[in-house]
């Protein structure tokens, strides 16, 4: 059973930075994609960024490109999301997700099997 535990959320002013972490455990992650999603009040959950565990290949939604960076530490079994130049529209609950996806899969609309509990990010204007 895969377990994901997020940390690092909080309140920050616009233009500030936060770093989210996701501790992963339960199995080896060959073939896995680790994704970050967010859900704002009244909105659907959306894909933010993802990283393939073995190769380190990354993908981002357009609204965060150049501001957010996803990374993983295979030795520590953690996935991180560094968020810079935060904007009020980034306010949401952020979730870490994981699943085994074949090469060429579309990460953003996959129904991931494993999810963390979420961490709140609030950006004030």
Image (cartoon, rainbow, N blue to C red):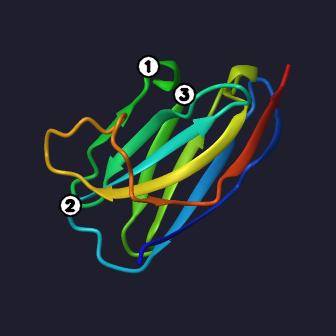
Residue 14 picture location, percent across and down: 78, 24
Q: Which mark is residue 62?
A: 1
Residue 37 picture location, percent across and down: 52, 41
Q: Is residue 72 above or below residue 110?
A: below
C-beta proximity under 8 Å, tags 3 and 1: no
Image quadrant where one finds the C terminus:
top right
**Kind of element beneath mark 1:** helix
**Kind of element beneath mark 3:** loop
Rounded to the nearest angstrom, the CA distance separating label 1 from label 2 is 24 Å
Q: Which residue is mark 2?
A: 31
Quick one: label 3 or label 2, which is nearer the N terminus? 2
Q: Which residue is mark 3?
A: 67
- Graded by Cα atoms within 10 Å as few (under 14), some (14 to 19) or many (20 or more), the crowding at tag 3 reads few
Quick one: label 1 or label 2, which is nearer the N terminus? 2
Q: Is residue 114 above or below residue 36?
A: below
**Kind of element beneath mark 2:** loop
- Horizontal side of residue 57 vs 79, given as left or right: left
Residue 98 picture location, percent across and down: 39, 57
């Amino acid at each position: 059973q895969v377990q994901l535990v997020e940390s690092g959320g909080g309140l920050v002013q616009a233009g500030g930075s936060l770093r989210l972490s996701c501790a992963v455990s339960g199995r080896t992650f060959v073939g896995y994609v680790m994704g970050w999603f967010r859900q704002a009040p009244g909105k659907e959950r959306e894909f933010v960024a993802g990283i393939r565990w073995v190769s380190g290949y990354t993908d981002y939604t357009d609204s965060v490109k150049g501001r957010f960076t996803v990374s993983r530490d295979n030795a520590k079994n953690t996935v991180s999301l560094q968020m810079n130049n935060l904007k009020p529209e980034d306010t949401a609950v952020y979730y870490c997700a994981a699943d085994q996806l074949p090469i060429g899969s579309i990460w953003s609309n996959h129904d991931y099997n494993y999810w963390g509990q979420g961490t709140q990010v609030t950006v004030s204007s």
